[in-house]
Image (cartoon, rainbow, N blue to C red):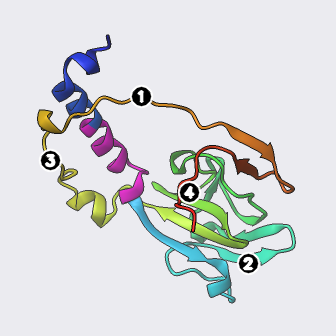
Amino acid sequence: MSDDADDPQAAWRRGHECRAAAVSAPYGPLALTGTYRLADYPVGRIPAVAGRWRTTDGGVALTAVAEDGLRLDGEPFTGDAVPAADEAPAARSRLSAGEVRIVVIRREGDWAVRVFDPASQARRAFTGVVATPVRPRFRAAGALQAVHRGPERPGGERRRTGPRTRPRR
């Protein structure tokens, strides 16, 4: 038996502490200060982000001057770049301005940048994740069973072949 099965209170406490740490991490969800769709800024100046941004056929183009204070891969950046969409967590974003991380994303065909600031108001105001304590009477035994995924569809999507999640009509 695992320690968690023997002591549900301790397991809950560890899980709660991990959740609070993840939420309040320097580049976690509370550090997100904005998501800016480039289509909403045709001139290329995003209020919270230095540089001039625009979409191109190849993705996103960024132009910066020394006064913008941008860094690319940890080095001061001036000139032009075409950064790809970030796949890594915000803490490892290639673009930064001081402690602020700038993450290039693509969602539903639109290019955008997300700004993560470890000094954000939300992080400073965070006092913890509100949660109710463990109540043993609500404890239920269960088992995790993986869902078999079926063959791929055109475009790389996979079709679910496990149990239906919605009732049939």
Picture residue at 29% right of the left edge, 63% below the top: 122
What amino acid type should be assigned to the residue bearing mark 2? Arg
Comparing marks 2 and 4, which lies closer to the viewer? 2
Mark 3 and mark 4 lie on one chain; the one further toward the N terminus is 4
Q: Mark 2: few, some, or many residues within 10 Å (few <14, many ≥20)?
A: some
> In the picture shown, does residue 15 fall above or below 163?
above
Residue 1 falls in image quadrant: top left
Q: Mark 1: few, some, or many residues within 10 Å (few <14, many ≥20)?
A: few
Measured as percent of width and height from the top left, residue 83 is found at 74, 59
| 27 is within the stretch colored magenta | yes
What amino acid type should be assigned to the residue bearing mark 4? Ser
Q: Mark 4: few, some, or many residues within 10 Å (few <14, many ≥20)?
A: many
Residue 44 falls in image quadrant: bottom right
Q: What stretch is highlighted in magenta?
A: 16-30
Q: What element carries label 1?
A: loop
> In the picture shown, does residue 35 fall above or below 96?
below
Mark 2 and mark 1 lie on one chain; the one further toward the N terminus is 2
What amino acid type should be assigned to the residue bearing mark 1? Ala
Q: Distance between the residues labelled 2 and 1?
A: 49 Å
Main SS of the magenta segment?
Answer: helix
Mark 1 and mark 4 lie on one chain; the one further toward the N terminus is 4
Q: Mark 3: few, some, or many residues within 10 Å (few <14, many ≥20)?
A: few
Q: Which mark is residue 96?
A: 4
Picture residue at 67% right of the left edge, 83% below the top: 39
> In the picture shown, does residue 148 fall above or below 65?
above
